[in-house]
Image: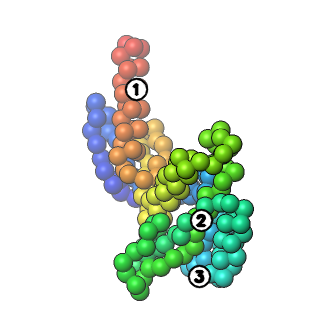
């Protein structure tokens, strides 16, 4: 195990935060969107293609059935980052694929029968959220905690503060049970 990213003393307990180098991709979870990627060095999509022409065919089919398709951009230089908005660097960035927001998944998950403007706005928020989570993952923002070199939990994708908050809540629980059992 590598050195702790952060060490915190909290209520007489030691919390250590580490990078989780074996964290699972958020794309392995249940998602409402499908990431279509064509890149010769990276395959972080739900569907990965050998050529951009193949992606264009998939996008045409998705649009034909009424799904929303949003361009997905990547900046790659000493690591990668992804976004639904283009990056300013013309040499190390560009469109790498698209995000398909499945109309039937949105209708099903929100319990609706008609794809309204309001529901489309929710769908776009879902897509943005899934891209942001995947961006955190590809940038290596995946953490785990160890409490008192005994208890641990891993796989916190995103801002380190969520991992710290969860660890503190476990310490709070431990402290409460220590007081009750004494």
3D distance between C-alphas at marks 1 and 3: 48 Å
The numbered dot on residue 148 is none
Q: Nearer the viewer, mark 2 or mark 1?
A: 2
Please state the horizontal and vertical placement of residue 118, each as a whole percent of the image: 53, 46
Q: Earlier in the sequence, mark 3 or mark 2?
A: 3
Q: Residue at x 28, y 30 (%)?
A: 11
Helix, strand or loop under label 3: loop
Residue receiving disc 3? 40
Q: Nearer the viewer, mark 3 or mark 2?
A: 2
Q: Residue at x 68, y 60 (%)?
A: 66
Residue receiving disc 2? 69
Residue receiving disc 1? 174
141 and 170: which is toward the camera: 141
Q: Residue at x 59, y 81 (%)?
A: 40
Please state the horizontal and vertical placement of residue 20, each as a whole percent of the image: 46, 55
Please state the horizontal and vertical placement of residue 5, each as a whole percent of the image: 33, 54
6 and 51: which is toward the camera: 51
Q: Is residue 158 above or below residue 147?
A: below
Q: Is residue 179 above or below residue 70?
A: above
Helix, strand or loop under label 1: helix
Quarter of the picture holding the N terminus: bottom left
Please state the horizontal and vertical placement of residue 119, each as a whole percent of the image: 56, 47
């Amino acid at each position: 195990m590598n050195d702790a990213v952060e060490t915190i003393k909290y209520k007489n307990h030691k919390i250590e935060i580490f990078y989780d180098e074996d964290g699972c991709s958020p794309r392995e979870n249940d998602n409402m969107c499908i990431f279509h990627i064509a890149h010769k060095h990276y395959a972080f999509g739900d569907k990965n293609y050998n050529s951009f022409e193949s992606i264009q065919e998939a996008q045409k089919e998705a649009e034909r059935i009424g799904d929303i398709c949003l361009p997905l951009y990547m900046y790659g230089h000493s690591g990668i980052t992804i976004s639904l908005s283009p990056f300013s660097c013309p040499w190390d960035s560009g469109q790498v694929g698209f995000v398909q927001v499945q109309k039937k998944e949105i209708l099903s998950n929100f319990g609706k029968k008609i794809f309204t403007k309001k529901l489309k706005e929710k769908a776009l928020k879902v897509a943005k959220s899934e891209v942001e989570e995947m961006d955190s993952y590809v940038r290596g923002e995946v953490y785990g905690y160890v409490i008192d070199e005994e208890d641990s939990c891993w796989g916190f994708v995103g801002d380190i503060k969520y991992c710290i908050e969860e660890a503190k809540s476990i310490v709070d629980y431990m402290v409460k049970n220590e007081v009750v059992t004494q």
